[in-house]
Image (tube, helix red, strand yellow):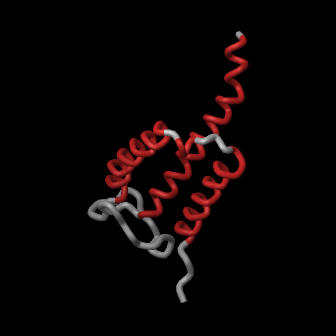
Amino acid sequence: MRAVPEYTVLTALAIVVVAAIELVWLRTGVFRTAQYWLAIAIVVGFQVLVDGWLTKLSAPIVLYHPGAYLGVRFPWDIPIEDFGFGWAMVTLTIIIWVRLGRRTAPERRDQ
């Protein structure tokens, strides 16, 4: 029996943890904003271009151990885990940015 690839497991864990941070703990409401989804669309667009170039099987710059991920690549040669990992990184950054901005915004208005 083959073990579940660690990149796949860590990506799934990152997605669940970041979603839980937003939906259960910080509750910034970013998932309900058009700005968030536009930002994600822009990130994915550039991620496809850059990640596609970095991971292309014809001349890869970044190599993945075959046992570390599922082996599903889409589009072009991008491991699907990269999209989940990228989403988690960008989303956590936006959530923290929004949360810190809301906390400090009243201070700036008083100055």
Instruction: Decide: is 10 above or below 101.
Output: below
66 on left or right of 32: left
Percent from the top left, x then y, of residue 48? 35, 51
In the image as oriented, which residue stretches furthest toward the front? 32
Q: Give the residue at x 71% y 29%.
A: 103
Horizontal arrangement in the rendering, residue 3 relative to residue 46 (left or right): right
Q: How far across and how far down the image is residue 24, in percent?
A: 70, 52
* Closest to the observer, 61 or 88: 88
- Vertically, is 67 above or below 75? below
Residue 41 at x, y = what percent? 40, 45
Residue 99 drawn at (x, y percent): 66, 36
Residue that sits furthest to the bottom in the current view = 1
Q: Quadrant of the N terminus?
A: bottom right
Answer above or below: position of 72 versus 16.
below
**Image point 57% across, 40% down: which residue?**
94
Residue found at the far left of this picture: 58
Query: Residue at coordinates 56% horizontally, 81% vertically from top-left?
Result: 3
Vertical position of residue 37 compared to residue 66: above or below: above
Q: Quadrant of the C terminus?
A: top right
Image side of residue 87 versus residue 55, left or right: right
- Outermost top residue: 111
Viewer-side residue, 97 vs 20 = 20
Q: Nearer the viewer, residue 67 or 4?
A: 4
